[in-house]
Image (spheres, grey):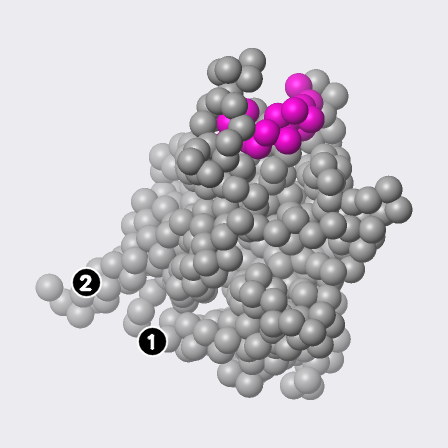
Amino acid sequence: MDVKDLASQMDALWVMVAAILVISMQAGFALLESGSVRMKNASHVAAKQVLSFAIATIAFWAFGFAITFGEGNRMFGTSGWFVESADAFRSLDWAHVPLSLKFLFQLAFAAVSLAIAWGGFAERAKLSVYITFGFLFTVLIYPVIGHWVWGGGWLASLGMQDFAGSTVVHLQGAIAALIATLLLGPRIGKFNENKTPNKIPGHNQVYTVLGGFILWFGWFGFNAGSTMGTADGFFGFVAMTTNLAAAAGALGALLAAKWFTGVADVPAMVNGILAALVAITASCAYVEAWAAVLIGLIAGAVTFWTSVYFEKKGVDDPLNAFSVHGIAGILGTLSTGFFASPRLVEQNGIGKPGLFYGGGFHQLGIQLIGVLGAAIYVAVVSFIILYILKKTIGLRVTREEELNGLDISEHGEYGYPEHLRLKPWREAK
């Protein structure tokens, strides 16, 4: 075996490990989200993650991967259905690993975006809506923006910098979650008649913290894995900026919570970590370590403030999906327009240096165009799909089902049957 063959095998092994790390984020979402909702919905929310990955796998294999990376036009790919031919995916030729690994790694990203989108549906949406919207999101929404940025589309031709998906993955999921939140309306009891919000705490903050830690761990595959290789050791630098941002985000959110509320809010700290990770996802390969700390700190603090702001405005986003993944996704995507280092831009070969390095407003403008283009497309298509579903099969469970909990109404038993003393579902009928 020569050195070239050994390097190729090392790259393949790294991408496989990275894919497993990203897939393991589904377990993190399951713990984070089930811990953040009420006990009567915990099993439903956890099981939703299994459903999420299953739907994303089939839909992305059949159609999504081809639309994202297949040969086509500036808007979407038109070849490579069912991942049959490597010749159809020239946009991924820069990664020297087997096509099966490219698919598995990119599938993990699509599944994360869908998991984020479903955060806006929590505690009140029908299971049938999850299934229908999940499939359509993975075929009609996620792959189109993915193609624009990563598959040789029009944003790629402009030089948009989104290394691992602050916009492609996180902003897409967050916009879809926001549209779902607005169409579903608030949970029963969330707001009083005078529009003031009531706190609906999650049932298990330990689960929330543990889920956040698993996501933090999985993010090393998310960001560092996006190098798709090991030869120059650059994945280590990406891992470092990722970790620095996450740590700063935890501190930023905790300080913001203490400043605004007087208490060191635990879910706020976890959301600060996630917001920082979302923000650094676009810029992890383009910014120096000091900028990563600053980006994480800002994202963590801003996310806490926006979550409070949206709640006061009557938006019931149970898992703060739009603040954590949307606002932070926007901040992260724009951050390269400010902080992209000349040496790192040259190394990655995409776009130009940021404003603070003398690059002017060129890259910032491109990043803004990317954010606006993606947000508008996802919002419009998500609204059309969800509005049609609302007028046909309906989006929301009945009042009785919501009050009893989706564990019992959708799955027939509670995740904590010994603690919930409502009648069994079959008797309640």
- Say what amino acid the circle numbered 2 marks: Asp
Give the image quarter of residue 6: bottom left
Name the quadrant of the N terminus.
Answer: bottom left
Query: Is 408 positioned to the left or the right of 358 in the image?
Result: left
Mark 2, Cα crowd under 10 Å, few <14 / some 14-19 / many 20+, is few
| Residue 286 spot, x, y in % from top left | 54, 75
User: Which residue range is magenta in the image?
Assistant: 393-409
Which residue bears the numbered disc 1?
A: 233
- List the single residue furthest toward the front: 421
Based on the picture, tell me whether residue 397 belongs to the magenta stretch. Answer: yes
**Cβ–Cβ below 8 Å for labels 1 and 2?**
no
Whole-angstrom CA distance, mark 1 to mark 2, is 17 Å
Q: Which mark is residue 159?
A: none
Label 2 residue SS: helix
Camera sees residue 150: yes
Q: Is residue 233 left or right of residue 389?
A: left
Toward the viewer: 306 or 195? 195
Q: Amino acid at mark 1?
A: Gly
